[in-house]
Amino acid sequence: MAEGVRPRVKAPKSAEAGEVVVIKTLISHKMESGQRKDSDGNVIPQSIIHRFVCAFNGETVLDVEMHPAISTNPYFEFEATVPEAGDFEFTWYDDDGSVYEDKKSVSVG
């Protein structure tokens, strides 16, 4: 697991049924390309967030595949429709096998 990785999500706590909301995500991750060497000359293993998935009540809203050229601290801003009360689940997948998750609940009023 990479050190200092912290996912952050900004999503509304409530919405009207059928409303389109804006969601913002950022994950603090330094992203190693696998091409740099440490002070002893050893290659630093690749460690990038290679996939990001957002689901609402188990249904995929967004599924993004990333490659080594992605910048550090990947940020996504996107719109999603809230059909009913439920949970947005956010998952980031790291090359080193780590999985980072966050969840935000949305009520419908």
Image (tube, rainbow, N blue to C red):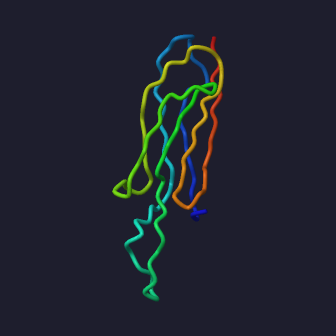
Which residue is located at x 51 percent, y 58 percent? 95
State the residue in front, 18 or 49.
Answer: 49
Q: Residue 49: percent from the left, percent from the top?
A: 48, 53
Q: Residue 77: percent from the left, percent from the top?
A: 42, 35
Residue 21 located left or right of residue 84 = left
- Quadrant where the N terminus lies? bottom right
Residue at the extreme left: 69
Q: Is residue 36 above or below residue 11?
A: below
Location of residue 59 (image quadrant):
top right
Q: Is residue 11 above or below residue 2?
A: above
Which residue is located at x 65 percent, y 17 percent? 85
- Quadrant where the C terminus lies? top right
Residue 24 located left or right of residue 106 = left
Q: Residue 81: percent from the left, percent from the top?
A: 50, 19
Location of residue 90 (image quadrant):
top right
Q: Residue 31: percent from the left, percent from the top?
A: 45, 61
Image label count:
0
Q: Is residue 11 above or below residue 21?
A: below
Residue 7 located left or right of residue 107 = left
Residue at the extreme bottom: 40
Which residue is located at x 59 percent, y 57 percent? 97
Which residue is located at x 57 percent, y 10 percent? 17
